[in-house]
Amino acid sequence: MALTGEPAFFENYATELQRYFEVTAFRPAPNQFACSFSDITERKRAEMLLRDEGQHFRNLANGGSTLIWTSGPDKLCSYFNEPWLKFTGRALEQELGNGWTEGAPGRFFQLRANLRHSL
């Protein structure tokens, strides 16, 4: 950064302080160097908590045999659990949005037959 003049941006964990920092370094003018540090510890903790909760949800959703899907206010499906994908034999990318409706109603009857067979 000091030689090229290209700004640098990175995150760093300071072990001694037990804090996360966002670091920006830049050269405002030749022969000058500036650096700013922003404490982002709370944001990083929130991100880690959200990641852990997401993993917990996935473990619960994929741990059984229940077929689970979610959709948003737009009524487009945004999540299918692994048992759903195994049951339908389709990839996640195929199911997303309205993809899960492809082949209906014929596909519905096949799904129903698969369900009866699996019981």
Image (spheres, rainbow, N blue to C red):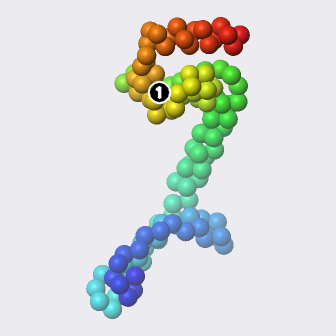
Q: Residue furthest bottom?
A: 31
Total number of numbered discs in the rendering:
1
> Compared with residue 33, is residue 81 higher up or lower down, i.e. above or below?
above
> Compared with residue 20, is residue 4 higher up or lower down, i.e. above or below?
below
Residue 47 vs residue 72, the one in the foreground: 72
**In the drawing, does residue 116 fall left or right of residue 27?**
right
**Residue at point 39% right, 86% down?**
2
Helix or strand or loop: what does disc 1 sit on?
Answer: helix
> For residue 9, what is the image quadrant?
bottom left
**Residue at point 50% right, 25% down?**
70
**In the drawing, does residue 119 fall left or right of residue 72?**
right
> Compared with residue 79, is residue 41 higher up or lower down, i.e. above or below?
below
Check disc 1 and report the residue beneath it.
Answer: 95
How dense is the environment of label 1, judged by Cα within 10 Å: few (below 14), some, or many (20 and up)? many
Residue 32 appears anywhere in the view? yes
Horizontal and vertical percent position of residue 69: 53, 24
**In the drawing, does residue 57 fall left or right of residue 91?**
right
Q: Amino acid at mark 1?
A: Glu
Residue 72 appears anywhere in the view? no
- Tell me the quarter of the image containing the N terminus: bottom left
> For residue 41, what is the image quadrant?
bottom right
Horizontal and vertical percent position of residue 108: 50, 11
Horizontal and vertical percent position of residue 107: 49, 13
> For residue 13, what is the image quadrant?
bottom right
